C-alpha cells in the first residue's frame, strides 16, 4: 500500500527492518528466517509491475526510490531487472539495471541470458545486446553465436560488435569458437563486409583463404573491405589475388577493368604493405 501511494520512504524503512531479520546474526530461528525469505519473494512478485513502471518513468525521484527497493530485495529482483532491461527505452536506465543485476551474482546473470532467444522481437533484442558488455567478464559468447541466426541484419551487426568486445578477454577455447563463428559469416551476404572487418581487427588467420577466394566475385563493398584487410594481415598468400585485380582485360573495344576502380585502388594501396 505504501508503494502504491508513492510513500517509498516508509516502505524502504519497513523493508530494511525485515531484511535485518533475514540474517542469522539478528534472527537465530531458522524457521522465522525461512518465513521472512518467503515473504520477501512473494512481495517481490507482487510489486514487480509497480517497480518496473517507476524505473521506466524517467522521473528521477521515482526511479531512485524504486532502485532503493530493488537493492533491498536483492536476488528476488532479478526478474524485475531483466524485464526493465528488455522494456526500457532509456539507455542509461538499462545500463543501471544491468549493473544491479550483475551485482546480484552469476546465477542472476545466467538466468538473464537464458531468457534470451530467437523468438524475441528485433527492438527488444537490440535493447538487450546494447548492454551485454555491462556483464563482462561473464562469458556470453555462446549466446551471441546463437543470436547470429537471427534474420534481422541490424541485430547481426550488433552481435558482431559485441563479439569483438568479448574476444578481447576471452579464454583460448572461447576465442577459437568466436573466430570460427566470424569466419563462417563470410558466407553471409548480409554481413560479409562486417565479418571481414572484424576478422581483420581480430587478425583471424583462419579467415584468410575464404577472404582471398572472394576477391573478384564478392559485391564491390565486400571486395574493398577485403583489400583493406589484406593490408592488415600482410600475408604473401594474398599477393597473387591482389595483383590479379590490378590487371586489365583487353578486348576488341579497348581496355576494361576486371574489377571496379574503387576495388583496384584499394588493392594497389594494400600491395604497398607487402
Image (cartoon, rainbow, N blue to C red):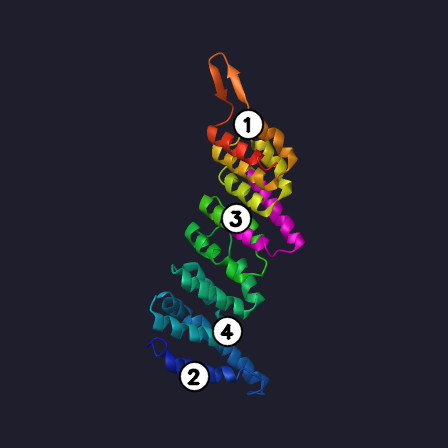
Please rate how many residues cluster around mark 2, counting C-alpha atoms within 10 Å: few if below 14, some from 14 to 19, many from 20. Answer: few
* Residue under numbered circle 4: 74
Q: Depth-wise, is mark 3 or mark 1 nearer the camera?
A: 1
Looking at marks 3 and 2 on the same chain, the residue that comes earlier in the sequence is marked by 2
Residue of label 2: 14
Asked whether 105 or 186 is in front, the reply is 186
SS type, badge 4: helix
Residue 244 is covered by the magenta coloring = no
Q: Is residue 162 covered in magenta?
A: yes
Mark 3 to mark 2: distance in Å? 46 Å
The residue range painted magenta reads 161-186
First reached walking from the N terminus: tag 1 or tag 2: 2
Nearer the observer: mark 3 or 4; the answer is 3
The residue under label 1 is: 245
Q: Is residue 6 left or right of residue 242?
A: left
Q: Is residue 233 above or below residue 40?
A: above
Residue 255, above or below 143: above
Query: Mark 3–mark 2 contact, CB under 8 Å?
Result: no
Give the label on residue 160, or none. 3
- Residue 94, by quadrant, is bottom left
Cα–Cα span, label 4 and label 1: 61 Å
Up/down of 9 relative to 176, above or below = below
Q: Position of residue 129 (x, y in %)?
A: 48, 55
- Percent x, y for residue 166? 57, 55
Amino acid at each position: 500500500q505504501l508503494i502504491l501511494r508513492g510513500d517509498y520512504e516508509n516502505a524502504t524503512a519497513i523493508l530494511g527492518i525485515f531484511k535485518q531479520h533475514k540474517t542469522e546474526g539478528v534472527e537465530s530461528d531458522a524457521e522465522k528466517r525461512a518465513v521472512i525469505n518467503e515473504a520477501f519473494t512473494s512481495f517481490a512478485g507482487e510489486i514487480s509491475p509497480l517497480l518496473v513502471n517507476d524505473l521506466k518513468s524517467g522521473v528521477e525521484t521515482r526511479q531512485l526510490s524504486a532502485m532503493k527497493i530493488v537493492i533491498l530485495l536483492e536476488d528476488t529482483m532479478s526478474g524485475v531487472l531483466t524485464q526493465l532491461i528488455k522494456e526500457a527505452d532509456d539507455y542509461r536506465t538499462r545500463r543501471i539495471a544491468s549493473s544491479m543485476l550483475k551485482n546480484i551474482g552469476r546465477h542472476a546473470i545466467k538466468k538473464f541470458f537464458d531468457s534470451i532467444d530467437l523468438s524475441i522481437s528485433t527492438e527488444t533484442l537490440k535493447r538487450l545486446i546494447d548492454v551485454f558488455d555491462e556483464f563482462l567478464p561473464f562469458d556470453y559468447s555462446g549466446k551471441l553465436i546463437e543470436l547470429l541466426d537471427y534474420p534481422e541484419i541490424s541485430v547481426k551487426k550488433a552481435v558482431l560488435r559485441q563479439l569483438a568486445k568479448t574476444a578481447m578477454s576471452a579464454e583460448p577455447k572461447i576465442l577459437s569458437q568466436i573466430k570460427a563463428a566470424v569466419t563462417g559469416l563470410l558466407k553471409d551476404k548480409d554481413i560479409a563486409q562486417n565479418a571481414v572487418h572484424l576478422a581483420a581487427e581480430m587478425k583471424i588467420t583462419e579467415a584468410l583463404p575464404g577472404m582471398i577466394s572472394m576477391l573478384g566475385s564478392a559485391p564491390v563493398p565486400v571486395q574493398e573491405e577485403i583489400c583493406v584487410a589484406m593490408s592488415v594481415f600482410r600475408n604473401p598468400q594474398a599477393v597473387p589475388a591482389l595483383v590479379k585485380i590490378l590487371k586489365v582485360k583487353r578486348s576488341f573495344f579497348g581496355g576494361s577493368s576486371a574489377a571496379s576502380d574503387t576495388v583496384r585502388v584499394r588493392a594497389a594501396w594494400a600491395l604497398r604493405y607487402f
